Structure formats: structure tokens, C-alpha cells
Amino acid sequence: MPRNDYPKISIRSKNELAKHISSKTLPYDTALRLIKDVLANFNRYWYDSSASEPEKGKFVRSAVGTPLNILLKLIDQKVLAPHDHLIPDFIFGGVSGKNHIQAAYHLLGKRRDRTLLGLDIKRFFEQIDQKRIFYLFYSKCGCSVEGANLLAQLCCVPLGPKNSRNAGTSIARGFATSPRLALWSNLDTFIKISWVVKKKLKGHDPRIAIFVDDIGIDASRVTSEKMEEVFKKIENVLVNFDHNQKLPLNPDKKKMQLHSIRAEHLGLKLGRNKLSMGKKSRSRKDKVKDSHSKASSDVERSDLKRRKIAYYKYQQQINKVQTKNS
């Protein structure tokens, strides 16, 4: 089941990385200086974002406003993104031109009486350590030891809060490169999950959509016992298929829902051949609409109008995906 069509990156040194990211607006010499500067000042160029959730062990890292941010975006755009065409069609996170709306729509299927199984990988980014990223670049993507070490070093940070002297490292939640690296470093496992779903739910119009750490499985006229069996198989794959990369699920986020009652995935309600805003988004939209009519100042009205427009645009995005695929 392991694939042979991984990206052929073949970077062997700082010089070759500089060639990959250089352009008319970023000459080779300037690109090389950028890489050397980031390597020399790496720890100064990133910080913990206020969006972090320490109580959950999730630390969002930011490099905004630094040369590291520029370099990471270049690596993502010039080294990783050109290979998006190799990614299977059931994967939607970390891929150009795909989003969570498309992932949810992909689950709708063509047959009636559908059941959704929603799963969430626990602390996904934090599970993927620097050794794993080195292995990806060296063993799968054709980089040399030096090139693989270079790329892994640039894309990973220590676990826990910054300067906590934690011995472990992982891809950085918040870095531009992380969604694609999380995908590519676990692609064989995701393909195995897709195979399991299609085999176990054959004849039930099975659908699977993976969006970063969210896994959605949807099928027609299937019993809850059958879906539970599928869940156990997937759980086993995530923990045991690749002994070098265990990906335990978050038990608190497992859900099994009937479309006929109310099924939501990625914040969207799944109906019969139709998507709509989920309960939280719709409630917030209604609250904003109500507050706008009662606003007492121009500043408040302006802010609420901006938020109303944002919800309107979100609905337009949902409509666009449905129109395109109908």
C-alpha cells in the first residue's frame, strides 16, 4: 500500500534550497543569505502566539514579521505546493484550492439514509516530530542527509512553551509548511484508512474526507454496529499501521450522527445533497443580525455590518461549492 509517487524534491544543501526558492524578485544570492540568516537566528524569529491552548498541550507558533516567515512561505510555495497534484482526492487539508466546505460536501454521497462518523486525531501536529520530517525528506523525497536535516530543522520547533527546555520537537502549529508536511508524512496511513473504509462499507456508497486532523466517514443504509466496527478498524490503523508514527484519536470528539436527525461536520450541516451552516455559525449570524438592528452607535453598527458581510460571504462560498458540484 505505500506509494511510490512522493514529491521528488532532491535538495542536498543550502545552495540547492536557495535555487529552489529563488526567482526574478529574489535572486539566488539573496535567497542564500536569507537561509543563512534564518539558520543563525532561528530561535529569535519565532514566538508563541496568543492563540495557543496550553491546557490542551497545543502551542501555536508565529514567525510573522521575521525572515523565518518569509522563508517558510517560500518553502511551502516553491518546494511543497507544486506537488499537490499527487495528493488523493479524499484529502482536503493542506492542498491548494481545497477547503473544509469541499470536504464536507464530499461526504454527502448519492444514496439516502446516511450516517456520519466523525473522528479527530489528538494533537496532530505535536505528534509529528523532527525525525519524522527528516525521514520524509530523506527516504521519500530523495533529499540528501544534509538537505533533509536542513528542511526538518527549519520546519520544526521544541514541544511545549518556548524556552521550556523540552527535549522533543515537532512541526510547528502555525508555520506555513506544517499542513502539507503533516499530510505527506502520514500519507500511507491515510491511504490505508481510505482502503479500509471502502472495503468495510462496500455497497453502502462510502465516502471519506480528511481535512488536516478531522476524518469524516459517511455511508448509506448502514447500522451503528457496522460503523462502530469501521471506527475500531480505523483506530487500529492510526495506532498500529505505522509503528514509527502513532496517531491516537481524541475520544471526546468521536461522533456518530444520522443525516435525518442532524449531522454536522467541520461546522457544516449535512443534508440530502445539500450543505448549510452549522448550528453555531447560524446562531452567531442571527445574533449579529439582531444586534445590528439594535445598535446604538455608528461604530457598533459598522462593526456588526462587517460581521454580517462576513457571514454573507461564507454562505456564498457554501453555495458556490454546491453549484459547482451539482
Image (cartoon, helix red, strand yellow):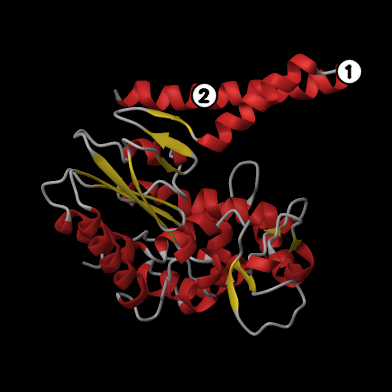
Observer able to see residue 4: no
The quadrant of the picture occupied by the N terminus is bottom left
Q: Which quadrant holds residue 4?
A: bottom left
Q: CA distance from mark 1 to mark 2?
A: 27 Å
In the image, residue 146 above or below residue 212: below
Q: Which residue position holds label 1?
A: 297
In front here: 170 or 52?
A: 52
x and y percentages locating residue 187 in the rendered image: 35, 62
The structure residue drawn at horizontal position 77% and vertical position 76%, both measured from the top left corner, is 163
Foreground pick, 128 / 277: 277
**Residue type of the residue flagged with mark 1:** Ser
Q: Is residue 259 above or below residue 206?
A: above
Instruction: Say left or right for 295 vs 36.
Output: right
User: Circle 1 — which element?
Assistant: loop
Residue 216: assigned label: none
Residue under the image location 41 percent in, 75 percent down? 246
Q: Residue at x 63, y 31 (%)?
A: 284
Q: Amino acid at mark 2?
A: Gln
Q: Quick check: 139 above or below 34? A: below
Q: Position of residue 57 (x, y in %)?
A: 64, 69
Q: In the rendered image, is residue 59 in sight?
A: yes
Q: Quadrant of the C terminus?
A: top left
Is the residue under label 2 in contact with that under label 1 (CB below 8 Å)?
no
Question: Pointer 1: residues within 10 angstroms few (<14), some, or many (20+)?
Answer: few
List the residue tagged with mark 2. Answer: 315
